[in-house]
Amino acid sequence: MSRYVLAIDQGTTSTRAIVFDGDMHVAGKGQKEFTQIYPRSGWVEHDPEEIWESVISTVNMALRDAGITARDVAALGITNQRETVVVWERETGRPIQNAIVWQDRRTASYCDNLKRQDLERLFTRKTGLLLDPYFSGTKLSWMLANVKGARARAARGDLCFGTIDTFLIWRLTGGKSFVTDATNASRTLMYNIAENTWDEDLLDILRVPAAMLPEVKDCAADFGTVDADIFGAAIPILGVAGDQQAATIGQACFAPGMLKSTYGTGCFALLNTGADMVRSKNRLLTTIAYRLNGETTYALEGSIFIAGAAVQWLRDGLGIIGSAAETNALAEKADPTQDVYLVPAFTGLGAPHWDAKARGAIFGLTRNSGPAELSRAALEAVCYQTRDLLDAMQKDWKNSGDDTVLRVDGGMVASDWTMQRLADLLNAPVDRPVILETTALGAAWLAGSRAGVWPDRDGFSARWKRDRRFEPDMDDKVRAAKLKGWKSAVRRTLSEG
């Protein structure tokens, strides 16, 4: 039996496909960026057809790069950008409009209206989430209300709703499988995470017909089979998880108290709380970390909307760098006497502030401020925001003590400067793994272990290896001053600040 496992990692700005061999090493990969669509200020969309085409092309790239064919693949795992909404016709599979991306803020006023009706406590109790445009439910409600005839068609059962995983599985299986997993369902504002079921009360409030919702499965399960004519052979789809939960799995954070943070377009920190569904008092999210063999493991999550996207803004928006890699060297030579703070609230602020109306700001600029100081500020913003999340987690959960070690992954962790500054500002060790493709690895492990070609949870954990540990090395007074400056900058950025 082949021990190759294929992972599709469908992200916010690009799609990646990675082939792992029997030793869980990367054997081949493909990557393709796709168009970011901004119809109005605060609105973000993707073309589902372009995403679909990127999946097909990157999988073929990865297979070629590995020197194998689809016949050599034992199983497929899928991980995806969470909360992004697609609605398509059940009969044709054709989307009724562009996907509304998790970053999109168009439903801010709708969320405010629900809050005025004193409904946030109900949503939080059932879903672990807050009423924020970030989540899928209000995006779906907006689409049903604003696409002509959509609500009536949905009520008749003519339309399907899905996060990106569901849409891809539908397409890959030729419409035979209409499914999602518990982690993606838990991010929709419509799924009761205690009862593990779609919640009728919340569906009624959001005016979403239950007929358009997919079946919810464990993260390692039979999600259907890829049609043989797509890649040249049938491939069983055996693992699915939202990107941040997949990274948690890929980092082998299976024990309560283990913490990981992923630095991609945004930044997402998850703290495993085991069977304990911790109710946050500090505006963190309670979410499903994973569900295996019918048993649910929960997590506290802090979501930061802008991380690597701030560096992308320096490159594409301001044009002051040619590539993201340049920021590391620029940050190193920035003037240490300048305290420049970038609060990257381009699409609002996430945890623990949850201010959808906040917008980005820069503080502390002087005539001598230039690309180096802005690069440092963009990288430091990620570190400061992570510190805010860690502080909130330690207040929320008594078992998360001061001996925290943060496991990190994502594109930004290749920067030694950023990881050292992260350790300095957290005042905690930061561990970077040997395998940085942890999101794809997590999805691959779900599929590979389900197929019986990869080890179980304990065997997988034993294989996790650290590349480097970054220890804090900043004077306490310097750290305190920097954190004070950051808190001041955030306070001045908040919409009601």
Image: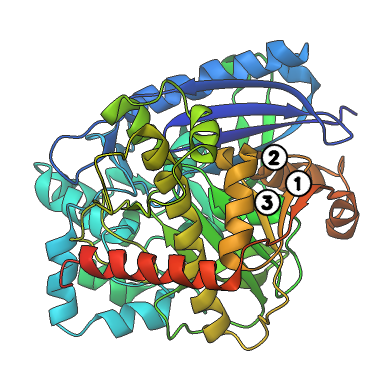
**Mark 2 residue crowding within 10 angstroms, few (<14) / some (14–19) / many (20+):** some
**Label 3, label 1: how many angstroms apart (C-alpha)?**
27 Å
Q: Amino acid at mark 3?
A: Ala
Residue under pointer 3: 221
**Label 2, label 1: how many angstroms apart (C-alpha)?**
6 Å
Residue at x 59% of width, y 66% of height:
426
Specify the label residue 89 is tagged with.
none
Secondary structure beneath label 3:
loop
Residue under pointer 1: 433
Toward the bottom, the furthest residue is: 398
Q: Nearer the viewer, mark 2 or mark 3?
A: 2
Residue under pointer 2: 436
Of callouts 3 and 1, which one flags the residue occurring earlier in the amino acid sequence? 3
- The location of residue 89, given as percent across then percent down, is 29, 36
- The location of residue 308, given as percent across then percent down, is 45, 41
Secondary structure beneath label 2:
loop
Secondary structure beneath label 1:
strand
- The location of residue 489, given as percent across then percent down, is 29, 64
Q: Is residue 64 left or right of residue 382?
A: right
Residue at x 90% of width, y 29% of height:
1
Q: Quadrant of residue 424?
A: bottom right
Residues under numbered marks 2 and 1 in contact, where contact means CB atoms less than 8 Å apart: yes
Q: Amino acid at mark 1?
A: Pro
Q: Is residue 463 visible?
A: yes
Question: Compared with residue 277, is residue 383 higher up or lower down, i.e. above or below?
Answer: above
Q: Is residue 94 visible?
A: no
Residue placed most toward the observer, 84 or 144? 84
Q: Quadrant of residue 66?
A: top right
Of callouts 2 and 3, which one flags the residue occurring earlier in the amino acid sequence? 3
Q: Quadrant of residue 490?
A: bottom left
Q: Quadrant of the C terminus?
A: bottom left
